[in-house]
Amino acid sequence: MNELTKSAVLNSLKKLKFDGFDPNIITLNAIQSFEQSGDNLNIKMSFATQSNPEFLKQKFDEQLRKDFPSLKHINIDLQTRSISSNISKHSDPKKDSILPGVKNTVAVASGKGGVGKSTVAVNLAVALAKDGAKVGLIDADIYGPSVPLMLGVKDKPKVYQAENSVRMLPLENYGVKFISIGVLVDDKAPIIWRGPMASGAIKQFMTDVEWGELDYLIFDLPPGTGDIQLTLVQTIPLTGAVIVTTPQEVSLIDARKALMMFNRVNVPVLGVIENMSYFIAPDTGKKYDIFGSGGGERISKELNVEFLGGIPIDPRIREGGDNGTPMVYDQPDSEYAKIMMDISRKLTEQVNIRNSRDDNKIEIIL
Ligand SMILES: Nc1ncnc2c1ncn2[C@@H]1O[C@H](COP(=O)(O)OP(=O)(O)OP(=O)(O)O)[C@@H](O)[C@H]1O
Ligand SMILES: [Mg+2]
């Protein structure tokens, strides 16, 4: 018979599979208190889900009785939350005409390439979805799409003929809907797109894909601050941008350029995320600042934008990207997952602040 521990309860509940319920949303942290005496079990849980709490409680009760037959009394205090209703909408005529069901559009950008934008964009999207937000992700990197690999999807999207246009259904994994050039063209075929064609493709990703109702549509931008990026950020009606940098000076210089690019086109920068901030040696627990330290925070202060958080270097993050299992989903109790959840909540705060400023503007005009 199973020994009754907090982890055993978690493992038991994670076996549950039914429509609309994703067992990976339950983490050790979700079990806030755990008391067992004899054949009595009292647990208190809290997590984000769109499922009906009474129905969940019943399912949890059945599963625990099956795995721990000696239990006579099980009392589950379950608090569920959905952040969807707490996310405000960015009202903008251009956005509302192109993407009527989408509350907010957020670009994940960097000046320098290879700093971890796509990894951040994917894990951020999954983190928001884990908190109960409705999330979509557009891979705006036409030259080097990496979202399909990182989300572990090889399928092609379903395409159908609507009245006078061709419509496409987004693909979906880990609660995130997405589209990428990588799922539309063979990855062995060379993609010889030029700048204008790239922005044309992104426009189609917005107009021809059935996004439905979303709290966030996130854009994983290609690296750089050249003409292609400038055209792109003008094509997308953005609520705001998030800039990813590493702590080293060469990356910070390019992060400043990215910020200036967004300023030029009046897109608010919602915050800076520092990736590859430090490395904790798994054998000694010693912290190494491989790319220097504090750069992300410094640049946030200097440019007067929010610092959303610092992400460590961890080989599991890369493995998760290569295997199509985002670490925030696959290792929900890791330090990394906590950091990403925190960053995603700070982002929602910044989006809400930004949208309330827009409301103020309207009030002043009236
Ligand atoms: N914090 C991290 N720890 C370990 N590996 C990481 C981390 N962040 C990203 N990586 C790895 O670094 C590589 C580059 O990351 P990624 O593709 O996300 O960068 P990018 O900025 O999107 O690149 P590009 O500019 O080419 O679009 C990937 O192999 C990824 O798995
Ligand atoms: Mg990328």
Image (cartoon, rainbow, N blue to C red):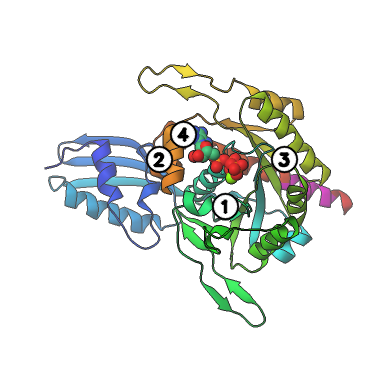
214 or 65, which is in the foreground? 214
Few, some or many residues within 10 Å of mark 4 (<14, 14–19, 20+):
many
Q: Is residue 195 left or right of residue 312?
A: right
Residue 337 in picture, x, y percent from top left? 45, 37
Q: In which quarter of the image is residue 1?
A: top left
Counting residues from the start of the chain, the first of labels 3 and 4 encountered is 3
Q: In this view, does 239 lie to the left or right of 75?
A: right
Counting residues from the start of the chain, the first of labels 2 and 1 encountered is 1
Q: Name the residue under label 2.
A: 332
**SS for tag 4?**
helix
Residue 341 appears in the rendering: no
What is the distance, in whole Å, between disc 2 and disc 4 at their CAs? 8 Å
Quadrant in which ligand 1 is drawn: top right
**SS for tag 2?**
loop
Counting residues from the start of the chain, the first of labels 1 and 3 encountered is 1
Q: Quadrant of residue 154?
A: bottom left
For residue 222, the mark is: none
For residue 145, the mark is: 1
Residue 246 in picture, x, y percent from top left? 61, 30
Q: Circles 3 and 2: CB distance less than 8 Å?
A: no
Q: Mark 3 points at which residue?
A: 269
Q: Does the residue labelled 4 lie within 8 Å of ligand 1?
A: yes
Few, some or many residues within 10 Å of mark 1 (<14, 14–19, 20+):
many
Q: Circles 2 and 4: CB distance less than 8 Å?
A: no
49 or 93, which is in the foreground? 93
Give the amino acid at mark 3.
Answer: Val
Q: Main secondary structure of the magenta part?
A: helix
Q: Is residue 89 left or right of residue 285?
A: right
| Identity of the residue furthest to the bottom in this view | 163
